[in-house]
Image (spheres, grey):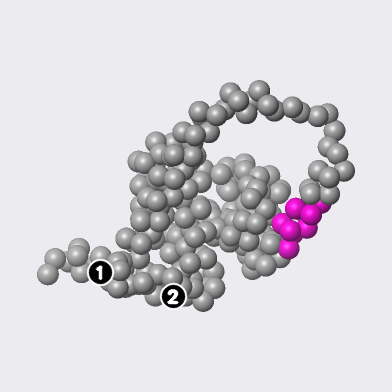
Amino acid sequence: MHPQRHEGSRGEASRELLLRRVAAGDQSAMAEFYDQTSAVAFGLALRILGDHAAAEDVVLEVYVQVWKQAAAYDASRGSPSAWLLALTRSRAIDQRRSLRRDRATEPLEAAADISTDAPGPETLTVAAERHRFVQKALGSLNAELREVICLAYFGGFSHSEIARELGQPLGTVKTRIRTGMIQLRALLAPLNAPLPVAKEDRS
């Protein structure tokens, strides 16, 4: 038997266990699964899309799907990595088609876009409701994830500044931010609205 093949099969068995823990709502298992597999998922998304930011967005959406659908993973139909890459490929292709459609309709949308100087009462009401929804979603995260998300996305701190502030390794901070964002995206999906971009989102 080849050592690398044996190591690969052990790694997939470990990831199967992680997915079972994710299905049970284990946040640390989600962070570990992300750390083990995100580089490969990002590489595939980048090859399909050819755009760094679009690939990052797709990968985040894929891990939202993993978080929500881990219980649906069926080991008899393939390894965890194969399942993850199938999700990534499908979502990246959908994103590529969507980007092409957006570019085709952009001039029409720009012509129809009429801006106003001040928001009306309906806009303010929606904004207030959205704020309450976001606060409720943040409250559902554990304290460690909530802290780094608030510092990064609402405090304007970079990843390295947060690491210094909390006395945590930079890698730990990045993992917590990404894990928190995966969970927040799942919780905020009904709003269909992106969160603010962090100061050092790609570091």
How many neighbours does mark 1 have within 10 angstroms: few (below 14), some (14-19), or many (20 or more)? Answer: few
Q: Quadrant of residue 148?
A: bottom right
Q: Relative to 49, does residue 44 appear above or below in the rendering?
A: below
Q: Secondary structure at mark 2?
A: helix
CA distance separating discs 2 and 1 = 17 Å
* Part of the protein shown in magenta: 128-136
Between 176 and 30, the one nearer to me in the picture: 30
Which label sits on residue 20?
Answer: 2
Residue 177 in picture, x, y percent from top left: 57, 55
Q: Is residue 133 magenta?
A: yes
Q: Is residue 195 magenta?
A: no
Earlier in the chain: of badge 2 and badge 1, it is 1
The amino acid marked with disc number 2 is Arg
Outermost residue toward the right? 121
How many neighbours does mark 2 have within 10 angstroms: few (below 14), some (14-19), or many (20 or more)? Answer: some
Which label sits on residue 9?
Answer: 1
Residue 176, can we see it? no
Q: Is residue 47 left or right of residue 169?
A: left
Q: How many numbered marks does the figure carry?
A: 2
The residue at the point 44 percent across, 75 percent down is 20
Which label sits on residue 146?
Answer: none
The residue at the point 70 percent across, 28 percent down is 113
Residue 11 in picture, x, y percent from top left: 31, 68
Q: Quadrant of residue 84?
A: bottom left
The residue at the point 39 percent across, 36 percent down is 50
Q: Relative to 5, does residue 60 appear above or below in the rendering?
A: above
Q: Is residue 184 left or right of residue 84?
A: right
Q: Relative to 191, does residue 137 appear above or below in the rendering?
A: below
